[in-house]
Amino acid sequence: MIGAVLLGVLTVVVGGCVCVVWAERGGPRWARVVATATLAAGSLVRHAHRNRRRGLDRSGGDDA
């Protein structure tokens, strides 16, 4: 079951990346919409990762 979920997530990610490349080359409107959503999701993930890392760095200094 977990393998099927991971395979589905991988398929969505690869499809999003394909749409980003296709949209850069002038693909159809739906590919540009998917590409925009993919880039926005990637930006949100990067932002959340940075915030989480900053929070971990701050909490690590209080142990000493």
Image (cartoon, rainbow, N blue to C red):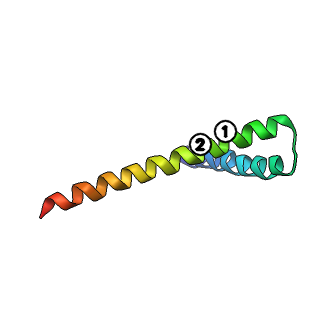
The percent coordinates of residue 48 (x first, y second) are 45, 46
Structural crowding at the residue carrying mark 2, measured as other residues with C-alpha within 10 Å and reported as few (<14), some (14–19) or many (≥20): few
Q: Determine whether 62 is above or below 38 in the image.
A: below
Q: Position of residue 28 (x, y in %)?
A: 87, 39
Q: Residue 14, labelled with which disc?
A: none
Image quadrant occupied by the C terminus:
bottom left
Asked whether the beta carbons under mark 1 and mark 2 sit within 8 Å of each other, the answer is yes
The residue that appears at 53% across and 44% down in the rendered structure is 44
Q: Amino acid at mark 2?
A: Ala
At label 1, the amino acid type is Ala
Please name the residue shown 71% across and 46% down the image.
Answer: 16
Where residue 26 appears, as percent x and y from the top left, is 87, 46
Task: Tell me how far mark 1 sits from mark 2, CA to CA.
Answer: 6 Å
Q: Quick check: 64 left or right of 50? A: left
Q: Which residue is mark 1?
A: 37
Q: Report which quarter residue 5 is drawn in.
A: top right
Residue shown at 64%/50% (left/top)? 10
* Residue at the bottom extreme, as displayed: 64
Left or right of 14, for residue 1:
left
Q: Secondary structure at mark 1?
A: helix
Element at label 2? helix
Question: Residue 22, percent across and down?
Answer: 83, 49
**Residue pictured at 81% horizontal, 35% vertical:** 30
Residue placed under numbered mark 2 in the picture: 41
Q: Circle 1: is it few (<14), some (14-19), or many (20+) Cα within 10 Å?
A: some
64 shown above or below 13: below
